[in-house]
Amino acid sequence: SMGYEPITKVTALGEVNLLVSRPAKGIDGEESTEIKSGWELKIVHSAHDNCKLNADAHFAVTDNWSTRDYHFASVDEKEFKVTVQFSGTTMPLNGNYTVCFRPDDDRAWRPIPGRGSQFLTVSIMGAGPRGLFLSQSTSVRAGQMQEVHLAGSRLHVPSENRFALSNSTEGCSQSVRLQPFARVV
C-alpha cells in the first residue's frame, strides 16, 4: 500500500523530508510505469479526517527531487520536503495530522499512513493552547505576603488571564470570598 517514511513525529519547526512510496504494482494495481511528476502531498489536521479539505497552512509541501534524483530514483517513490512553520502568528497545534496524497490532478486526495503510524504527529514544545493550566491548588499562611507559582503555557505578559484566590476547600464555585488577582510576573 501507499505510505511515507522515515518519520511519523515532528518535534520542531523547520524542514523534514517524507519519502512517499507506492506498491510495486502501482497505485491502483497498474504497472509501475506511471509518471510520478504529478504526485502531490498535503497535510490536514486529523480531527477533520477529510482529505478533501484545504491543506493546513502550518505545513508547506514542496517537491524535493532534483533532476539527477528523478533519473536515478525508483519509479515507485518520491521525496517531498515538508516545512513546518508559523501561520501568521500561530504555531501548528500539537496532535495528529493526516498526510494526504494524490498521483495527479484528475484523482481524489486520499490519506496515506506513515511507517508504523496512521498519522504524522506534531509534538512541539510550546505549541499547545495558551493560558493558565486549570485546577491548580496551593496554600499560603493567612495575613502574610506570599509568592505563589502557577503553571501555564505561553502566557502573555502582562497577562490576559484572570484567576481568583479562594479560601474554600470546595474550589471557586463554592467559595465564600474571592480575591481577584491578575498580576503575572
Image (cartoon, helix red, strand yellow):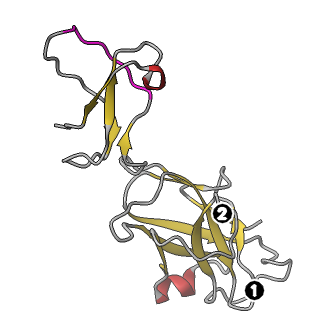
State the residue in front, 155 or 31.
Answer: 155
- Relative placement, left or right, of 139 versus 78 is left
Q: Quadrant of the N terminus?
A: bottom right
- The disc placed on residue 107 is 1
- Left or right, 162 with reference to 98: left
Q: Residues within 10 Å of mark 1 (few under 14, many from 20)?
A: few
23 relative to 148 in the view: left or right? right
**Does 68 appear above or below 56?**
below
Disc 2 residue type (three-letter):
His
Mark pair 1, 2: CA separation: 20 Å
The residue that appears at 64% across and 77% down in the rendered structure is 74
Residue at the left extreme, as displayed: 145
Label 2 residue SS: loop
- Magenta-span inclusion, residue 180: no
Residue 48 badge: 2
Q: Establish if 161 lies above or below 17.
A: above
> Which stretch appears magenta?
135-142
